[in-house]
Image (cartoon, rainbow, N blue to C red):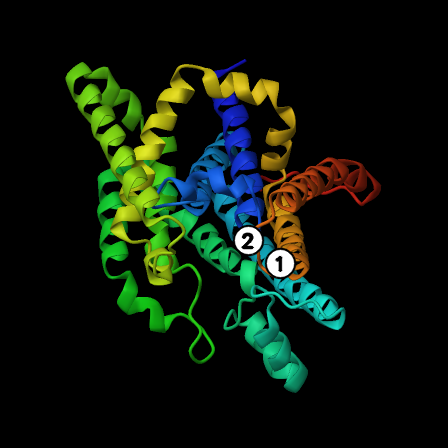
């Protein structure tokens, strides 16, 4: 097996793992989420997901350029942006449908998209127009418009990543620095901002692109003293963030920190990414991927898994909150985790048989 193929197996594994974590992290009464990344760090699975998205984009770009041409790769990613946009519209409507069904069953929970549903009921045409124009992004659908922006930007970023990575990094850092003032320029309804500011989060996407196109980790670790220093620094950052996170307990950080990718979230993530690169170098990730192939399956069905996970987590979270009156219940929380994770795995497994029943389409990276 080639090295690139090995990296793809590990990429699928980590993407699948992150998608599974995202599902439980959005279930308020989840027990598993008490031990996922956000419980011990100032970042969470979202940072990992965006970084891996950049890495996967660069991998797919290189493969398309090798098999065909760069022009074909550009066309493919423009098409991909519209596929993600379509997935956003579907997810937004599913969020509203799940909310409507649960409200009709007298289920009351904090994450239901009741405001968007009320606006849809009062002015259907206007609410649907707002969704189509990205002005309204019900609950978990909000990450997909950002990904559509990244897919559109890929034809500009990828050539720079290969030829002038430091210029791309400088542009990305500058854009991240001015991201908060740019927020009002994003399409939105009154008093509602995007959950993820793409001007800020592109920093991690670009980092993933550069990590795939340039041997940064290999070059740094090849210099023993420098590699040891960076690894020690990463350990110190992770330890410091963990101590601070545990000190905060269940206290939630301001949502603006996540929306605009605060510096401490980015630094904490880069520390985690650096140590994870060591795990990959030592071959441990490959062994895990081989031992848990079903996790990689979820990763290979990335877009489908995200949409299905959004529906599953909203449904399970709302029912669990309603049934327990919002109190933590260990047996029920574990049961909810098991159901949600199993449901997502079943969706991923069922997608191949269903695809064979549909008209054939070109295989694409999620």
Q: Observer-nearest residue: 170 or 119?
A: 119
- Residue lying at 29% horizontally and 39% vertically, measured from the top left: 243
Q: Is residue 223 left or right of residue 207?
A: left
Q: Is residue 264 above or below residue 123?
A: above
Specify whether 279 is left or right of 315.
Answer: left
Measured as percent of width and height from the top left, residue 234 is found at: 26, 31
**Residue with the most extreme right position:** 357
Element at badge 2? loop
Q: Position of residue 116 (x, y in %)?
A: 59, 74
Q: Which of the two residues, 133 or 103, is positioned nearer the viewer here?
A: 103
Asked if the residues shown at circle 1 and circle 2 are in contact, with their CB atoms under 8 angstroms apart, the answer is yes
Q: Residue, x 20% and y 19% (percent of image)?
A: 228
- Residue 219, percent from left and from top: 25, 22
The quarter holding residue 322 reads bottom right
Q: Which residue is mark 2?
A: 28
Whichever of labels 1 and 2 marks the residue nearer the N terminus, that label is 2
Q: Rounded to the nearest whole Å, what is the CA distance between mark 1 and mark 2?
A: 7 Å
Query: Eyeballing the image, is 68 above or below 317?
Result: above
Picture disc at residue 57: none
- Classify the position of the N terminus by image quarter: top right
Q: Which quarter of the rendering shows the C terminus? A: top right
Classify residue 177 as left or right of residue 346: left
Residue density around tag 2, few if under 14, some if 14–19, many if 20 or more, within 10 Å:
many
Q: Of helix, strand and loop, which one carries label 1?
A: helix
Q: Which residue is mark 1?
A: 321
Q: Residues within 10 Å of mark 1 (few under 14, many from 20)?
A: many
Residue at 29 percent of width and 61 percent of height: 179
Q: Position of residue 209 (x, y in %)?
A: 38, 39
Q: Is residue 118 left or right of residue 69?
A: right
């Amino acid at each position: 097996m080639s090295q690139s193929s090995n990296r793809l197996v590990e990429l699928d594994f980590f993407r699948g793992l992150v998608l599974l974590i995202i599902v439980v992290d959005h279930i308020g009464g989840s027990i598993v989420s008490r031990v996922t990344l956000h419980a011990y760090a100032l970042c969470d699975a979202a940072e990992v997901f965006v970084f891996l998205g950049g890495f996967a984009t660069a991998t797919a770009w290189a493969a398309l350029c090798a098999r065909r041409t760069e022009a074909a790769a550009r066309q493919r990613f423009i098409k991909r942006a519209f596929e993600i946009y379509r997935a956003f519209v579907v997810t937004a409507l599913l969020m509203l449908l799940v909310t409507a069904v649960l409200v009709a069953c007298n289920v009351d929970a904090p994450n239901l998209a009741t405001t968007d549903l009320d606006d849809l009921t009062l002015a259907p045409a206007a609410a649907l127009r707002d969704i189509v124009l990205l002005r309204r992004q019900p609950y978990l659908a909000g990450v997909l418009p950002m990904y559509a922006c990244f897919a559109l930007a890929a034809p500009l970023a990828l050539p720079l990543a290969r030829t002038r990575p430091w210029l791309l990094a400088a542009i990305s850092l500058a854009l991240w620095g001015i991201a908060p003032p740019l927020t009002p320029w994003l399409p939105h309804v009154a008093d509602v901002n995007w959950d993820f500011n793409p001007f800020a989060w592109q920093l991690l996407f670009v980092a993933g692109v550069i990590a795939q196109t340039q041997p940064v980790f290999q070059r740094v670790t090849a210099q023993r003293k420098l590699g040891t220093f960076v690894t020690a620094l990463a350990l110190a950052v992770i330890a410091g963030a963990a101590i601070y996170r545990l000190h905060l307990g269940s206290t939630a950080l301001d949502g603006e920190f996540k929306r605009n990718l605060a510096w401490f979230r980015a630094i904490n993530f880069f520390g985690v990414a650096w140590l994870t690169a060591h795990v990959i170098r030592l071959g441990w990730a490959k062994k895990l991927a081989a031992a848990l192939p079903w996790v990689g399956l979820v990763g290979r069905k990335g877009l489908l898994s995200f949409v299905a996970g959004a529906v599953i987590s909203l449904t399970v979270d709302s029912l669990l909150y309603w049934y327990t009156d919002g109190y933590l219940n260990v047996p029920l929380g574990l049961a909810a985790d098991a159901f949600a994770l199993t449901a997502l795995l079943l969706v991923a497994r069922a997608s191949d048989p269903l695809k064979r029943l549909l008209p054939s389409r070109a295989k694409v990276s999620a």
